[in-house]
Amino acid sequence: MTSLDLRGLVPAPVTPFTRDGKVDHAAIQRLGSWLGSFDGVKGLVVLGHAGEGTFLTPDEQAAVIRSFVESTDGRVPVIAGITLEGTKVAALEAKRAVAAGAAAGLVYPSHGWLRFGYQNGAPQDRYQAIFEESGLPLILFQYPDVTKATYNLETQLEIAAQPGVFAMKNGVRNMRRWDTEIPVIRRERPDLQILPCHDEYLLHTMFDVDGALVGYGGLAPEPLIEFIAAGKAKDYARARAIHDRLLPVTRTVYHRGSHMEGTVALKHGLVARGILDHATVRSPLLPLEPGAEVEIADALRSAGLIGRPTAVAAE
């Protein structure tokens, strides 16, 4: 079992692009250095949904991993999204991530499962093959209950028991399942680090967990570090106050017609915070409606996140 400790905030940062659509490595240095300067940040998950990872070529993916590793001088582990559909190609993707400097991998379900479901045992086989091929420590990714790629409790427990699997990113988005399954996973797999990713349901899922693996953390690390601390202290009043302060930001970033729009909104938020120069995304993502950037900036201002120092900590 890996000794990687993600018990805190694990942001999933965006991938900055230049205005002509290339990966912006200078902007990655600014973003990664900023996120890595916070004591409560335990890792960075790149090449996920927020990072537009599946929109990049294999060479670009490796370069993004290397840039984020360089951005924190190796102080903060970089975790790579492992997203390719077939098990063999996903295992090779994991090997490339290792070569680029990734400390762990977040394993996405095979894309076809979202629509058609999976055969019993197939997810377990996917994790086993990826770990055996690459040696990369792995994070179990529990997808939303509304998809056919969500894992039942037995499958979650069996994956969590496999060599190399040390943490879970749980985004089931069904509070009945959350309330009944998390205690069982805690009891049966006590060494598994449990990290929710419910950007839009932070309050309910911030208690009895080890931290949070959220795209939200790439925009607002300061209050989310406070939020995690309140949850671990079982301080509901404090957690509720942070939730309420962030609610305007949550609305403008995540309460949209499509959760994918959140990536575009995160980039606008980072522009407002002075970290990025512009909010360029890659197709199939599209720009937000006119005026959205003003609403996002106003929400960040109301939450006290504009006007705070955003400069990278001194080396």
Image (spheres, grey):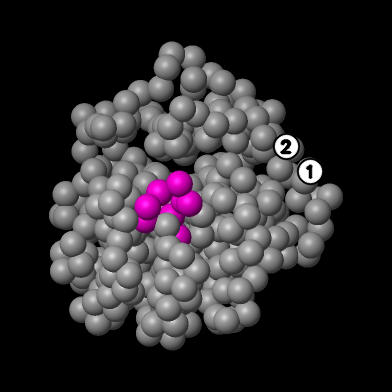
Q: Is residue 228 left or right of residue 140?
A: right
Q: Main secondary structure of the magenta part?
A: loop
Does residue 230 show up magenta in the picture? no
> What segment is highlighted magenta in the picture?
142-149
* 291 relative to 287, above or below: above
Q: What kind of residue is marked 2?
A: Arg
Q: Which residue is mark 2?
A: 245
Q: Is residue 40 left or right of residue 275?
A: right
Does residue 147 show up magenta in the picture? yes
Q: Quadrant of the N terminus?
A: bottom left
Q: Position of residue 178 (x, y in %)?
A: 60, 59
Q: Residue at x 59, y 66 (%)?
A: 181
Q: Quadrant of residue 58?
A: bottom left
Instruction: Tell me if I can see residue 36 in this picture.
Output: yes
Q: In whole angstroms, how far apart are the C-alphas of marks 2 and 1?
A: 6 Å
Q: Which residue is mark 1?
A: 241
Q: Residue at x 34, y 40 (%)?
A: 16
- Indicate the secondary structure of the residue bearing disc 2: helix
User: Would you say the residues marked 2 and 1 are in contact, meaning their CB atoms lie under 8 Å apart?
Assistant: yes
Instruction: Tell me if I can see residue 102 in this picture.
Output: no
Spot the residue most to the right: 237
Question: Who is closer to the viewer here, 234 or 175?
Answer: 175
Question: Who is closer to the viewer here, 13 or 310?
Answer: 13
Q: Position of residue 126 (x, y in %)?
A: 27, 71
* 250 relative to 235, above or below: above
Q: Position of residue 2 (x, y in %)?
A: 43, 82
Q: What kind of residue is marked 1?
A: Ala
